[in-house]
Image: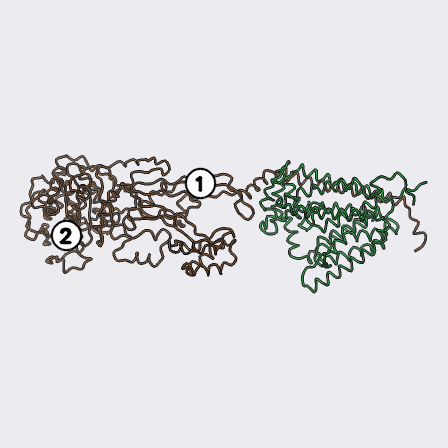
Amino acid sequence: MIHFEQQSLSQRLHLDMPLCFGLLVLCGLGLMILYSAGGEDIGILIRQATRMAVAFVLMFLVAQLSPAVIERWSLWIFLTGIAMLVVVLWVGHVGKGAQRWLDVGFFRFQPSELMKLAVPMVIAWYLSHKTLPPNIGNTFIVGLMIIIPVGLIAKQPDLGTSLLVAIAGLAVLFISGMRWKLIMAFAALCSLCAPILWHFMHDYQKRRVLTLFDPEQDPLGAGYHIIQSMIAIGSGGIYGKGWLNGTQSHLEFLPERSTDFIFAVYCEEFGLMGVLLLLSIYLFIVARGLYIAMNAQQTYGKLLAAALTLTFFVYVFVNMGMVIGQLPVVGVPLPLISHGGTSMVTLMLAFGILMSIQTHRRILSD
Amino acid sequence: MGLKFTLKDIQEETRLVRFRVYTAAVIIILLVMVLVGRLFYLQVIQHDHFTTLSQGNRVKVLPIPPIRGLIFTRDDVLVADNQPSFSLELIPEQIESLDKTIDQLSRLIDIDEESINRFKKLRQGKRRFESIPLKFKLSEDEIARFSVEQHKFPGVEVIARPYRHYPEKSGLVHVLGYVGRIDENDLQKIDVSDYLGTTHIGKLGVEKAYENILHGHVGHQQVEVNAQGRIIRVLERTPPEPGQNIHLTLDRSLQIAAVNIMSGKRGSIVAIDPENGDILALVSSPAYDPNPFVNGIDSKSYKALLDARDTPLINRALNGKYPPGSTIKPFMGIAALTTGVREASDTTWCKGWYSLKGHSHRYRDWKKGGHGHVDLNYAIMQSCDVYFYTLAHDLGITRLNKALTNFGFGLKTGIDIGGESTALVPSIDWKRRALNQPWYPGETLIAGIGQGFVLATPLQLATATAALANHGKRVIPRLVYKTSNPISGESTTLPLATPNYVSDYKKKYWDYIIQAMEDVVHGARGTARRSGANAAYTFAGKTGTAQVIAMGQDEKYDKDNVPEHLRDHALFIAFAPVEAPKIALAIVVENGGGGSSTAAPIGRQLLDHYLLDESGNLK
């Protein structure tokens, strides 16, 4: 291992400055809109800022680990996650009700969140040891690595998270060069499975999907979220009503305005211009993530960095799509903007991995 | 694993991953464009639509009901006002346990089961922070008892709301009517938008007829509400326009005097100013207290009023149909002179009865031995029936009908509050239509003395009397002459309705008939001479005693042997002073006995009351 003398500060701190910049701007914007959405409650703001600080520290710590260490831990993290999911299901069975949390005395832990990272990690680990693109046998094994945790999470039941975990896994497969023929076959299989899936869905889940197509059919029930959200967004117009001036949110017409529907508050107060700014920041982060993936030296790093970045974008897209009424209402928070801690920690850990991949590049001398 | 598998083509894999990352980037760009496209649609193209929806969410328009106009008598006595009524109201949001609170309250204040049920029903449609009444019309004692303990009842308040109140109680009910809760029928007739927030509407009398003046116009406030409907702030306020006050033509003092005179009697008194038709007093007895009707009278009390034998709910002044009896004679007299059927000096021989040629039936005079030779003046003064039988026979029913109709008998008077009956002046046509029978000559005879089919309301009698006093000008009676703005105090006098004219009769005929009526009260042999004695002014009158049952040919009417409800009605019409009439009145006392003994003294009393001051001099 040869280190050059002229290492930059960011290299030594293992922080990727462009990514850090994007994340900080996003968090700043997030705090600003949360102040408005949370009813100008300074307490919420402080708690959220604290979580952000904790998440940044975790990101920083993860970034110190070399990708090789992360790669070595991948399988164990995955297996631990599976074990915890089983425990959660068992506890839930005993407690008779939906159970997502594992109470470890001083803090509560959601194993399904961990799987958002563990699944792409283990698949990247597995595939990086095989030739790319993966053959059918490997693809099948990867499929099992996805289906087992996804099935366990879906059984909690937490359909939203299980889908996101599946997407994270599939993202690795996609980046690894899974053949288009296989992708098409998989897509066909999924569309065939859809009616079966529908059959196993809970009533409230079905209602959410149906509401998407016709929110007016139940304007005070399932459609209420979507209708109020679209009113908030539409009435925002090009320039918005101004910070703290959103009537839909401040007069409490908009439900879950500080969590899943915070994007509607943002749209109402900052208009289309604000939305374009926000999308630009997200795209900047995504672009940086993909850049890191392409420049990663190891296959593991390439696959994981790209998959985590794509998953990050999927979160953004699913949340926004839901808020603007194009996707069913699934509980996906808007990354780094929505109020809440668990998803933020997961996200920042992912960015910690990205930074680790970017800053631990070994420059080999000729 | 074999060694050959570990020899990976690093460059090829890098190229593959790079290509896939580019593909992903393209997909990301496409998805972002979908998002932006949708946001553009919502925020730019549909912006106006959603702005409207957002405003609709946020802004609610709440009505502010106007304050109903007050009603005063001519002498500015308040007879219909808006009094605060105190109700006990609960705000569920601020109360921990409603049942417990109601239970504790019922120890302080008498709360019946019905109130609790109504409270629960009202609660269903309301938000948690809205105040809901538990008990209406708290007594002062109850308010006092609650006030002492109020600190123990967070979320319980005593709220004052204005309610219509009629301080004269039954004294003016047949004039004022009353207001009641708006019902289905009312909703059909009103502009609902002007009644938002208003709970009551005029149901009867002046309250109903002048509803559009008394009501005023609704105001609005635009308020910003949150998703729970709680008012955050008032954005804009258009104050309501209060209803106009109304000033009655009634002279309160005369009205109360008339009410007192009639107390315990059944009948009606209508007094009007012949000059303009202003009604000075309007009494229908018995009456009832309108106050319980305002918030809905209980069915038991209502049924009692409805079933009462003396029918207090009926407005006898407007709807009581009485045979006018001999009070019709002055009008017959005018007809006699103006048609030329009689000269004033023509006399008729009264032998105590009259028979049609070829018939044996005797139409009897009230005076058994007869009046001898009577001219028109004597016939009116002495109320000679035979004179008027003969006259009616000579006029015939058609001319008789026209003569009476000219004075407004059988027609609506056009009183401003409406709701009056036309009563009846019979005709050959009418009888054929209504009864499918031919007209018999004998029926003309009894019509000539105001019996048989002839019916008149006290209001018609009073206006016809005023027309006599006016030498033919038939004024339209009215109860309201002025409105005033409660804020500026500025008043508007209502225009007089154009009067009708009986006909262009010669003055000497009017003078003759009026002289005869003067002789009724002031003449030595007038039927009401006792009532006319020692008057400080001259007045003209005519008594009437209307039979309720037909007497057999040889029966003698004996007051003491006839059941009360079959006794004769006592009537009296009069106006005074003769030279410049200021008041014309009609009095009907049901089953009161004789017109001269019962009704005429009442007339004198009321004329004195109206025309004289305290020391007995003409005002």
Residue A93 position by quadrant: bottom right
Q: Check chain identity for marks 2 and 1: say if they share one.
A: yes
Residue that carries the numbered disc 2 in the rendered image: B594
Regarding residue B560, the answer to whether it shows in the image is yes
Label 2 or label 1, whichever lies nearer to me, is 1
Residue A215: percent from the left, percent from the top? 61, 48
Residue A291: percent from the left, percent from the top? 81, 41
Q: In this view, does A290 lie above or below B99?
A: above
Residue B515: percent from the left, percent from the top? 11, 39
Chain brown in the figure, letter: B
- Please state if B422 lies on the left or on the right of A360 as rendered: left
Tint applied to chain A in the drawing:
green
Determine the CA span between mark 2 and mark 1: 57 Å
Residue B142 position by quadrant: bottom left
> Which residue type does callout 2 highlight?
Gly
Residue that carries the numbered disc 1 in the rendered image: B219
- Please state if B506 lies on the left or on the right of B350 as rendered: right
Whichever of labels 2 and 1 marks the residue nearer the N terminus, that label is 1
Q: Residues within 10 Å of mark 2 (few under 14, many from 20)?
A: many
Residue B367: percent from the left, percent from the top? 8, 51
